[in-house]
Image (tube, grey):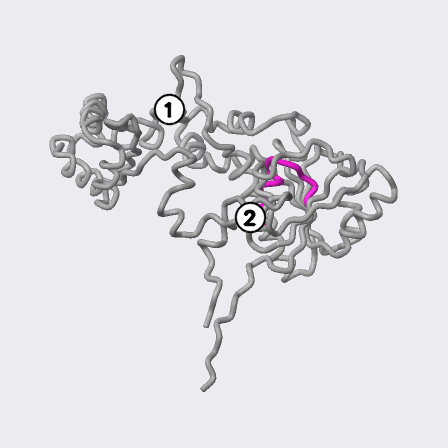
């Protein structure tokens, strides 16, 4: 009897080579995603080393290797363009037109390899009134309206987000998706293309729920404008007896009813979206959640369709049993041979890797 062994399916971008001229920020986030999906990423650094970020700044490791060239020297430029000949993607995050001055812009690169996908990532795009402005994540979130719709500090100022949302989602994921789509189109046309990824464009797209509402109705969304920005008590954060916090997101009436019944607060069921009594709803919920610890509430309400979860610290999230069971962390080894953990490739939980 012959037994058919399982066939391991390679990652989706297996065989794709990416030349990455970025260091940190959205470009580095994008190539980390591409590496997670199986691409070989060659990080092209300055010959003098420049300012090297710590390994965790861009998730360096598996699927990545580094080379160094002096792109201002003719021999270094020639070496880089030789790599271009066998590559599939070039990603850069210089200021607009800097790559052209270095001789590694889109026009020069496509002459070497007409099938290349060339992606420029920048804060404000390659053209426009802000294209040459310096900026970072907070600037991009501010310009596109993100900061103005979130939480507020004691003086009404927008609070800082807890993650680099613009770099990761609006820039990195935006660029990675654009590159994957261009690779797919190249399979049909045989031609490369140029991609201009502006991080602020991506943030504005993330704000589509509120931007479209404003454009259609003229209203001006802000903190407390809707259920998602703190207007109602059914969507918020509450402190518990041990000082921990739970997140409550019982938006749908059926989940709100279940939550209220579990808490013994049936009188709140009809008040879910009563604009005149939200202070009462919040105060009642706040008093109730102070009667048990965070983890006790989560154990009771999490599995009961109440849309309640713990507000975990980063350390708690990294130790979380649910994430551990989904194998979202892997072992790695640093340059000195010391073993440590890092986040697993993102495709690990989304893509079936084995077929019979």
Residue at (56% x, 63% y) in the render: 10
> Which region shows up in magenta?
20-34
**Residue 156 image point, x, y percent:** 40, 15
Point out the frontmost of discs 2 and 1. 2
Left/right of residue 297 with respect to residue 354 in the rendered view: left
Pick out the residue farthest to the right.
74
| Quarter occupied by the N terminus | bottom left
Left/right of residue 138 with respect to residue 274 in the rendered view: right
Which image quadrant is residue 308 in? top left
Q: Are marks 2 and 1 in contact (CB under 8 Å)?
A: no
Which image quadrant is residue 190 in? bottom right
Q: For residue 25: magenta?
A: yes
Mark 1 residue element: loop
**Residue 348 image point, x, y percent:** 48, 54
Q: CA distance from mark 2 to mark 1?
A: 42 Å
> 308 or 296, which is in the foreground?
296
Q: Which residue is mark 1?
A: 223
* Main secondary structure along the magenta-highlighted residues: helix
Position of residue 341 relative to residue 275, above or below, is below
Residue at (61% x, 40% y) in the render: 28
> 6 or 222, which is in the foreground?
6
2 or 1: tag closer to the N-terminus: 1
Q: For residue 129: magenta?
A: no
Position of residue 337 relative to residue 274, above or below, is below
């Amino acid at each position: 009897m012959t037994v058919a062994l399982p066939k391991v399916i390679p990652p989706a971008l297996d065989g794709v080579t990416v030349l990455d001229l970025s260091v940190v920020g959205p470009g580095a986030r994008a190539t980390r995603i591409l590496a997670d999906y199986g691409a070989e990423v060659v990080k092209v650094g300055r010959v003098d080393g420049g300012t090297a970020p710590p390994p965790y700044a861009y998730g360096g490791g598996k699927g990545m290797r580094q080379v160094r060239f002096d792109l201002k020297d003719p021999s270094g430029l020639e070496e880089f363009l030789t790599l271009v000949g066998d590559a599939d993607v070039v990603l850069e995050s210089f200021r607009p037109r800097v790559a052209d001055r270095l001789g590694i812009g889109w026009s020069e690169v496509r002459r070497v390899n007409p099938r290349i996908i060339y992606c420029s990532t920048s804060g404000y795009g390659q053209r426009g009134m802000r294209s040459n402005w310096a900026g970072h994540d907070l600037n991009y979130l501010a310009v596109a309206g993100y900061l103005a719709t979130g939480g507020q500090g004691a003086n009404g100022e927008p609070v800082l987000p807890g993650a680099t949302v613009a770099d990761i989602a609006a820039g990195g994921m935006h660029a990675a998706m654009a590159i994957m789509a261009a690779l797919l189109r190249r399979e049909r046309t045989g031609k490369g293309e140029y991609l201009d990824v502006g991080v602020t464009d991506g943030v504005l797209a993330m704000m589509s729920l509120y931007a479209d509402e404003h454009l259609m109705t003229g209203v001006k969304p802000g903190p407390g404008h809707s259920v998602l920005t703190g207007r109602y008590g059914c969507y918020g954060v509450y402190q518990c007896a041990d000082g921990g916090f739970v997140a409550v997101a019982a938006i749908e009436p059926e989940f709100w009813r279940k939550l209220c019944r579990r808490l013994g607060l049936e009188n709140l069921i009809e008040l879910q979206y009563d604009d005149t009594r939200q202070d009462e709803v919040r105060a009642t919920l706040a008093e109730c959640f102070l009667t048990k610890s965070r983890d006790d509430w989560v154990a009771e309400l999490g599995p009961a369709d109440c849309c309640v979860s713990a507000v975990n610290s980063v350390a708690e999230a990294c130790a979380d049993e649910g994430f551990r069971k989904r194998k979202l962390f892997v072992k790695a080894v640093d340059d000195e041979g010391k073993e440590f953990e890092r986040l697993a490739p993102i495709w690990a939980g989304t893509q079936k890797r084995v077929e019979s």
